[in-house]
């Protein structure tokens, strides 16, 4: 599991995340286990369809959630591929 507030990085694509809600299993990115901490590694390239800076991703199985602090290729994985959380839409009426 990961603790809320812990930081993880992907050694493959350079993505970095901070856990905003506890996950029940270790995180993976690019099919590799993520490493604790934020040190080192090149800046992640901006990849179309990849992990987006400042976005939240959630595991549909355990509802663990992370915030991306450095963009990367992804995909992030917990039990299942983590799902981009769309910002709550402003109330609009059609
Ligand atoms: Zn990665
Ligand atoms: Zn999970």
Image (cartoon, grey):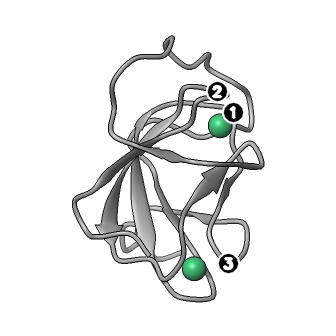
Which secondary structure, mark 2? loop
Q: In terms of depth relative to the viewer, which is nearer, 63 or 9? A: 9
Query: Badge 2 is on which residue?
Result: 13
Give the distance between the C-alpha atoms of the residues marked 3 and 1, in whole angstroms.
Answer: 19 Å
x then y, percent, for residue 20: 30, 66
**Any atom of ligand 1 within 8 Å of the CB at mark 1?**
yes
Q: Position of residue 59 (x, y in %)?
A: 58, 76
The yes-or-no answer for disc 2 within 8 Å of ligand 1 is yes
Q: Give left or right: position of 31 versus 21.
A: right
Query: Tag 1, which secondary structure?
Result: loop
Mark 1 or 2: in front is: 2
Residue labelled with disc 3:
79
Q: Position of residue 38 (x, y in %)?
A: 33, 32
Earlier sequence position, callout 3 versus callout 2:
2
Crowd class of label 2 (few under 14; some 14 to 19; many from 20; radius 10 Å): many
- SS type, badge 3: loop
- Which badge, 3 or 1, is on the more N-terminal residue? 1
Q: Are marks 3 and 1 in contact (CB under 8 Å)?
A: no
Is 49 left, or right, of 37 in this rendering? right
Closest to the observer: 4 or 56? 4
Give the residue pinned by disc 1. 73
Q: Residue at x 69, y 42 (%)?
A: 74
- Residue 37 or 75: which is nearer the viewer? 37
Question: How far apart are the alpha carbons under marks 1 and 2?
Answer: 6 Å
Q: Residues within 10 Å of mark 1 (few under 14, many from 20)?
A: many
């Amino acid at each position: 599991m990961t603790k809320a507030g812990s930081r993880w990085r992907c050694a493959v694509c350079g993505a970095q995340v901070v856990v905003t809600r506890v996950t029940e299993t270790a995180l993976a990115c690019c099919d590799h286990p993520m490493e604790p901490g934020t040190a080192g590694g090149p800046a992640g390239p901006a990849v179309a369809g990849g992990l987006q800076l400042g976005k939240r991703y959630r595991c549909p199985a355990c509802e663990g959630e992370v915030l991306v602090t450095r963009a990367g290729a992804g995909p992030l994985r917990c039990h299942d591929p983590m799902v981009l959380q769309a910002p709550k839409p402003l109330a609009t009426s059609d």
